[in-house]
Image: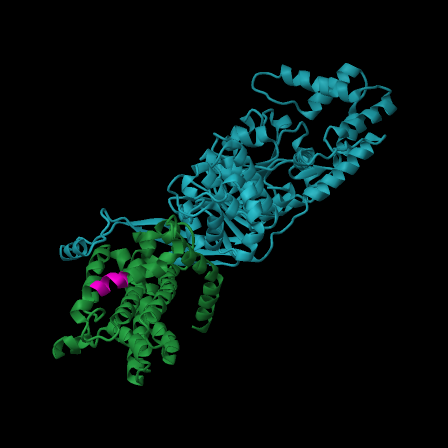
Chain colours: A green, B cyan
């Protein structure tokens, strides 16, 4: 067992260069040939935020303080997860040509997608800071602790990506189903509306929505300067860790047969 | 294969393996079981000539000797191929009008003095003896069976069943009649007979349609000249002068000196590195050939309910085992669909075997399909680093080699162009250059040499030979028999996923082609 972990770690180290190349490729290809290039990673969330603020702020203005920041945090945290999982979903099928010809640890493909979305997330934070400056919001020292929920979210996203990418090899329908699922998930997450406008029964359900918990964590840190209680931490971490363990296990079990189905 | 010397190990291993499959083993004598300590067997005639000159005062004896021999052979009665020693000397005696008994005796003495048992062939012979095989010695020779038998015993070669000499039987190997004669008189099934000899025509080609299996043992002096020619070609390519060896005054002692050098060098056995690079044990690979691929949930559930999820099993590989030593070059041959490419994929880790295990020590560079990891939106420069990373090469090394890669693939002017704008030849060139820029421990090559134009193919061949020369272990799949013989020490012949035979490349490839 220890020996297996050791060889696993060694392979991971050996291929870390490839992981980086894959992430860099993703980012390069996404913005290649666009005039503003990498600037889009910042502009995109800003513009989205602007549109949504204009549309939604009239509905929810009264109940939410600093709507643009509230919305932007919800948006970038949610899309970190939704982008990475939906890109990871097709990552194995999409790399069929490579997997059939060269031996590469297959988990690198979904992992690289999550990491490139993480880089994107980093750029979006710049947008967030810009918005906070423009709206003259208060900067809390606790904001620095954002890496904690980010870590929990990363566990969750990687786990979910591993699960989705491996099942999709067997059932291509998942790809279509998942985009519908993501839309539903987005509406069930208080991104642009406040939680307390929902009836209490629904609130109880949404409390179990992992994305709501992660977003809430970020909002507490950034907007209110509150470090969440250990219960929230345990919930967020536990959810991420369990998803990751299930993901790793499923991927391990299924990966040897990938090549026969892609 | 670079050096004909390394053949000995593979030859011994192959023949030991083959001998087990046969019950009758036959050997040729000259240059196979026995070696001469002079360059050519005809050099012995020079000694006889000197002897005749001294004792009978007749010059040019060797000329007379061969003249008479040739004319006698030509005059043979219909059903006879060869002349016997006594008949020959009778004729010589009549022609010259002197008593030739002494000369004939002297010639036999000289033959005995100038021959010795071939130590390499000796190992094979002894192995056949140990295996209690029926051993025949079959030679196109004018000498009598009695003389040859004594000669063999004198050189320590015993336990053979019988000697067949063309001179005595009157039938020769060159016409194939001697083999038919033995088959008939000894009641042998040709399928159980393995013949080992050094004459490409009479020991090898003639047996092609007889059902007898033949092993061609390349004469040592031919190996020497082949190596020499290769060497000279290489020197010429490098623009160096070739020095021609000049014979010394006494040609016989020169011939003996040179023969000793060649005999010593080419009977040396060089063993491969005992470390094993690839160990393949009982590998089987099964695929499900479902008539339709089920990849949607609806289909899956419907078929599950209807119990139609039945698959047709297809075994691409069945119980394949072999080892590849470090630095060995192994070729896989077989028809399309025999499992060669599947084997390479199992070794490179792309496929996991259904049964059995593969263990590999060292890093592998697969040249399975060039440019498999290219992203067509990226430029050549970006792709070099991406593809290098896919092959597991360290980034620093890729930075150092970057210029060599671009230069080798002749893409200097296009390095910043996205490769979707490249021609397929350019892509292949880049792919080959990247894959071969690093010296891997194990190189896997699957018929990629058919890319690019003729000039580039030549460059690829040279590059692969260079890599092979650096001690890299090579696994090679090709349909070109010539390439396999040229590049590999050892060949594995696959058919329907099973190993038919393996061993020395040339022998296995020839058997494959003659099947």
Picture quarter with the N terminus of chain B: top right
Decide whether residue B291 is among the magenta residues: no
The foreground one among B93 and B306 is: B306
Q: Is residue A137 left or right of residue A5?
A: left
Q: Is residue A50 magenta?
A: yes
Picture quadrant of residue B113: top right
Q: Residue at x 54, y 44 (%)?
A: B406
Instruction: From the top left corner, tell me how far across and down residue A243 is, in percent.
Output: 30, 71
Secondary structure mostly taken by the magenta-highlighted segment of the chain: helix
Magenta segment? A48-54
With respect to residue B9, does B357 lie above or below? below
Q: Is residue A33 above or below residue B151?
A: below
What residue lies at 14% left-to-right and 57% top-to-bottom? B305
**On screen, A111 above or below B217?**
below
Tell whether B45 sits left or right of B130.
right
Quarter-of-image position of residue B486: top right
Residue B217: percent from left, percent from top: 60, 37
């Amino acid at each position: 067992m220890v020996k297996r972990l050791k060889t696993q770690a060694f392979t991971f180290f050996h291929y870390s260069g490839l992981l980086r190349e894959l992430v860099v490729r993703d980012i390069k290809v996404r913005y290649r040939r666009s005039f503003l290039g990498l600037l889009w990673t910042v502009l995109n969330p800003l513009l989205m935020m602007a549109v949504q603020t204009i549309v939604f702020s009239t509905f929810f203005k009264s109940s939410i303080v600093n709507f643009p920041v509230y919305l932007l945090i919800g948006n970038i945290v949610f899309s970190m997860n939704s982008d990475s999982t939906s890109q990871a979903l097709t990552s194995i099928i999409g790399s069929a040509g490579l997997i059939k010809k060269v031996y590469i640890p297959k988990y690198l493909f979904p992992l690289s997608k999550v990491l490139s979305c993480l880089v994107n997330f980093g750029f979006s934070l710049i947008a967030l800071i810009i918005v906070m400056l423009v709206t003259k919001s208060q900067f809390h020292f606790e904001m620095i602790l954002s890496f904690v929920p980010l870590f929990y979210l990363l566990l969750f996203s990687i786990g979910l990506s591993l699960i989705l990418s491996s099942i999709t090899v067997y059932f291509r329908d998942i790809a279509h189903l998942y985009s519908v699922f993501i839309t539903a998930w987005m509406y069930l997450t208080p991104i642009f509306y406040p939680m307390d406008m929902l009836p209490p029964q629904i609130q109880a359900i949404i409390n179990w929505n992992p994305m709501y918990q992660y977003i809430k964590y970020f909002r507490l840190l950034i907007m209110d300067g509150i470090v969440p209680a250990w219960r929230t931490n345990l919930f967020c971490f536990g959810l991420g860790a369990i998803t990751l363990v299930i993901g790793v296990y499923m991927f391990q079990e299924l990966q040897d047969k990938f090549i026969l189905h892609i | 294969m670079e050096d004909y010397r390394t053949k000995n190990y593979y030859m011994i291993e192959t023949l030991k393996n083959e001998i087990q499959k046969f019950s009758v083993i036959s050997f040729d004598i000259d240059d196979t079981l026995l070696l001469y300590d002079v360059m050519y067997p005809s050099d012995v005639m020079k000694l006889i000539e000197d002897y005749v000159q001294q004792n009978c005062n007749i010059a040019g004896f060797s000329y007379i000797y061969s003249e008479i021999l040739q004319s006698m052979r030509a005059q043979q009665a219909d059903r006879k191929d060869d002349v016997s020693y006594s008949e020959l000397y009778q004729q010589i005696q009549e022609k010259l009008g002197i008593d030739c008994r002494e000369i004939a005796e002297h010639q036999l003495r000289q033959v005995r003095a100038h021959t010795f048992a071939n130590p390499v062939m000796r190992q094979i012979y002894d192995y056949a003896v140990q295996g209690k095989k029926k051993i025949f010695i079959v030679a196109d020779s004018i000498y009598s069976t009695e003389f040859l038998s004594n000669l063999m015993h004198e050189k320590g070669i015993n336990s053979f069943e019988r000697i067949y000499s063309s001179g005595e039987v009157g039938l020769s190997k060159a016409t194939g009649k001697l083999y038919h004669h033995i088959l008939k008189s000894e009641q042998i099934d040709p399928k159980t007979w393995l013949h080992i000899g050094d004459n490409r025509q009479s020991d090898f080609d003639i047996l092609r349609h007889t059902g007898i299996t033949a092993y061609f043992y390349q004469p040592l002096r031919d190996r020497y000249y082949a190596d020499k020619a290769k060497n000279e070609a290489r020197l010429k390519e490098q623009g160096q002068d070739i020095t021609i060896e000049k014979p010394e005054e006494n040609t016989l002692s020169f011939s003996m000196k040179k023969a000793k050098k060649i005999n010593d060098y080419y009977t040396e056995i060089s063993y491969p590195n005992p470390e094993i690079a690839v160990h393949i044990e009982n590998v089987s690979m099964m695929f499900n050939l479902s008539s339709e691929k089920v990849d949607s949930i609806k289909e899956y559930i419907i078929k599950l309910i209807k119990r139609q999820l039945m698959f047709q099993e297809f075994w691409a590989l069945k119980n394949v085992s072999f080892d590849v030593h470090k630095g060995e070059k192994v070729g896989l041959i077989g028809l399309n669909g025999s499992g060669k490419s599947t084997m390479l994929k199992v070794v490179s880790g792309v496929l996991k075997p259904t049964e059995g295990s593969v263990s590999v020590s060292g890093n592998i560079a697969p040249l399975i399909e060039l440019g498999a990891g290219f992203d067509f939106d990226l430029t050549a420069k970006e792709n070099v680093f991406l593809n290098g990373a896919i092959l597991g090469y360290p980034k620093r090394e890729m930075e150092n080699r970057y210029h060599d890669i671009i230069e080798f693939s002749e893409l200097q002017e296009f390095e910043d162009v996205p490769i979707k704008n490249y021609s397929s030849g350019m892509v292949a060139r880049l792919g080959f250059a990247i894959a071969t820029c690093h010296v891997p421990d194990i190189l896997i090559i699957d018929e990629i040499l058919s890319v690019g134009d003729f000039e580039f193919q030549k460059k690829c061949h040279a590059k692969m030979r260079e890599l092979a020369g650096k001690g890299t272990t090579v696994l090679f799949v090709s349909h070109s028999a010539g390439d396999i013989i040229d590049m590999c020490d050892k060949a594995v012949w696959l058919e329907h996923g099973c190993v038919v035979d393996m061993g020395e490349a040339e022998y296995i490839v020839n058997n494959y082609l003659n099947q």
